Amino acid sequence: MTTSLADVASSDAALRAFLHGLPGVDRVGADQRAAMLGTRSIKTTAKAQAIDLAISMVDLTTLEGADTAGKVRAICAKAVRPGGGAPSVAAVCVYPDLVAVAAEALAGTPIKIASVATAFPSGRSTLDVKVAETERAVADGAHEIDMVIDRGAFLSGRYKKVYDEITAVKAACGDAHLKVILETGELATYDNVRRASWLAMLAGADFIKTSTGKVSPAATPPVTLIMLEAVRDFRSTTGRQVGVKPAGGIRTTKDAIKNLVLVNETAGDDWLTPEWFRLGASSLLNDLLMQREKLATGRYAGPDYFTLD
Ligand SMILES: O=C[C@H](O)COP(=O)(O)O
């Protein structure tokens, strides 16, 4: 059954009534369930498949003030051919001024270009600047925009402002997909993570993303679990599927596989594809490649064998 939620966004009061009417998150239960799922072991054959699936879901990210065109070209080359016959990654994720470099480097490949916009990572700018930054990144070749929400507005209950910013940036995206970063490390409670997930989805997010990678804690398993529950419940309420992107602090193959188990056990296998689940990470890919090599040959090739992330 699908339901229209159009009126929910008419005012702060209507949004507040809806978001605060969502069931509360049982904090202890969420922590325990995420920890329990994190201990699941998988067979060696399934592990090889899981590593390749995880590689295909990586948004290979560089978001440093010291980024250069050369570094972006290098990660684009690695995104297309990570090495050892591994599949290509889903996307590269860069600052807006480097989108054109990535677009040139990835022309003719299926790899998506994602760009952080809207005054990443703080989100502290005016809406017209955020919209202009989004439009420019899309014009330069971004297929996906990773925007941050206004956490100050969210935490002070100005939900309509957050909603309106998301809808304005979504409109500025045109055909590009919009990932909405909640920056869960600043949201204080799991209830707020659930509310922000619903708010972003109501406003038109194609994906909800945990974190910028600049705030700790970032993509913790319980937070990812709560967001996966939110997309599952949002689809059963509205009929629309929204993707999930944990990002920030995901560095090891173990972390990646824990995430895949969370997806499978929470949202289900409809989400177990790069179309609906991404892993935002700057340094995960090398570990996935090293573990892949180990499974195939019985030994580690060593980090020097792979180019640096
Ligand atoms: O969006 C992705 C994050 O910025 C990456 O964070 P990370 O450097 O901790 O992997």
Image (cartoon, helix red, strand yellow):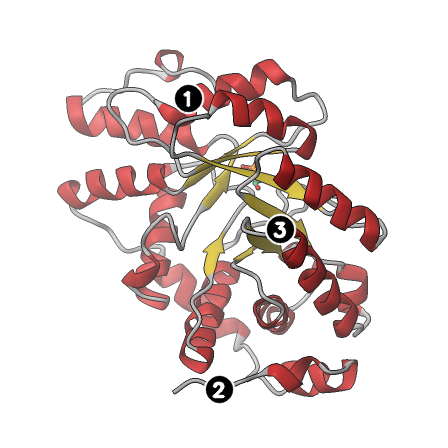
Circle 2 is placed at which residue position? 3
Please tell me which residue is depicted at 49% across the width and 21% down the height of the picture.
105
Say left or right for 123 vs 176. Answer: right
Circle 1 is placed at which residue position? 78
Where does residue 184 sit, x and y in percent of width and height? Answer: 63, 58
- Check disc 2 and give the amino acid type: Thr
- Check disc 1 and give the amino acid type: Lys
User: Ligand 1 is in which quadrant of the figure?
Assistant: top right
Label 1 or label 3, whichever comes before in sequence order:
1
Secondary structure beneath disc 2? loop
Taking 166 as reference, is 26 above or below it? below
Q: Residue furthest right?
A: 126
In this view, the mark in front (3 or 2):
3
Give the quadrant of the N terminus.
Answer: bottom left
Circle 3 is placed at which residue position? 173
Say left or right for 235 vs 14. Answer: left
